[in-house]
Amino acid sequence: LHAFRASGTTEVPELLEVLALAEQWRTQSAGAFQPQFQSIIALWDRAEAMGSRPAPDELAAIIAELTTTPIDNLNAVAKGWIAERALEHALGSVDSFEQAWLNLGGDIVHRGTEPLIVGIEDPARPYDNVAPLATIDVRNEALATSGGARRHWTIDGVRYAKVLDPRTGTPVDRITSATVVAPSAAAADVLATIGLVMDEPDFFRLLDTADACALVVRADGTIAATSDRFIPRPLPAT
C-alpha cells in the first residue's frame, strides 16, 4: 500500500482485489465508507496533540480534496479480507475438520459444521468480566464489530470515537457499536464501519443487499437488531 500511495498504481493482485472491494463499498454506501480519508485522521491526531477540535474550515478544505486523493486507508476492508485468506491458507493442507476459526482483532472468520457462539460486547462496559449484550451462532461466515469504546481521541476532556463520518470529517456519535455477520469477512468488516456512519434505515437496507445481519447499539444505550439470530443472553457456562 505504501508503494501504491506513492505511485498511484500497482500490479499486486491481492492489493488490486482489495482496492476493487473498497471502491465497490464506497459506491454501495453512497460515501459512508471512504478509503481516502487518512488526511482527516491526521488532522484529528494533530487536534488531540494541540488540545482543541479541528476548525470547521480545516475539515471542509480537506473534505473538498478527498475525490482527488489516492486511496490511502483500507483498514475497514483489508483486515477482514486478510483474516479470511489467512484461515483459508491454514486449512489448505487439512483433509477434514469439524470447526476452525480465526479472530484477527475482533474480525472473526468461521469454517466447519459446528457453530461458534460469539458474545457481543457492551460498548459502555468493554471489560472482560462483563456479560455480553447478546450472543450469536456463527457458522461458515464472518463477524466484525466496529465502535469507539476502545479507540478514541481525547480533546479537552471529551472522548471522540476514532471512527469518522467521511462526509463531514467528524467522529460518529449516534451509534456506539455495530456488529455485522456476513458471508465474507471483508463484507462484515466494512459493513460494521458503515453501520456507525450511515443512517439506520439506509444501513439496514444495505445489509439486505449483502445477505448480512447486524446488531447496533445506539448512543442512548438502546439496541436494534435486524435478525433474531442475535440472542440477548450471556454466554453459556463452561
Image (spheres, helix red, strand yellow):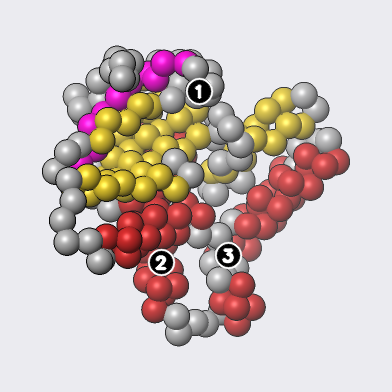
Instruction: Classify 10 Å Cα crowding around label 2: few (below 14), some (14-19), many (20 and above).
Output: some
Identified at 56% across, 77% down, the residue is 4
Q: Is mark 2 on a helix, strand or loop?
A: helix
**Residue 38 in sight from this viewpoint:** yes
- Residue 215 or 209: which is nearer the viewer? 215
Amino acid type, label 2: Val
Q: In which quarter of the image is residue 91?
A: bottom left
Mark 3 and mark 1 in contact? Answer it, CB < 8 Å. Answer: no
Pick whichever, 45 or 90, lies toward us. 90
| Residue that carries the numbered disc 3 in the rendered image | 72
Q: Magenta region: which residues?
A: 130-139
Q: In this view, does 160 lie to the left or right of 139?
A: right
Q: Is residue 26 above or below residue 205?
A: below
Which quadrant holds the C terminus? top left
Q: State the SS at label 3.
A: loop
**Which kind of residue does numbered mark 1 sit on?**
Asp
Measure the alpha-carbon separation of dots 3 and 1.
Answer: 33 Å
Q: In this view, does 82 lie above or below 131?
A: below
**Residue 194 appears anywhere in the view:** no
State the residue position of label 2: 18
Residue 63, position as x, y percentages in the image: 62, 55
Q: Does the magenta stretch include residue 221?
A: no
Q: Distance between the residues labelled 1 and 2?
A: 33 Å
Q: Residue 128 carries which label?
A: 1
Name which of mark 1 and mark 2 comes first in the sequence: 2
Mark 1 burial class by Cα count in 10 Å: few <14, some 14-19, many 20+ = few
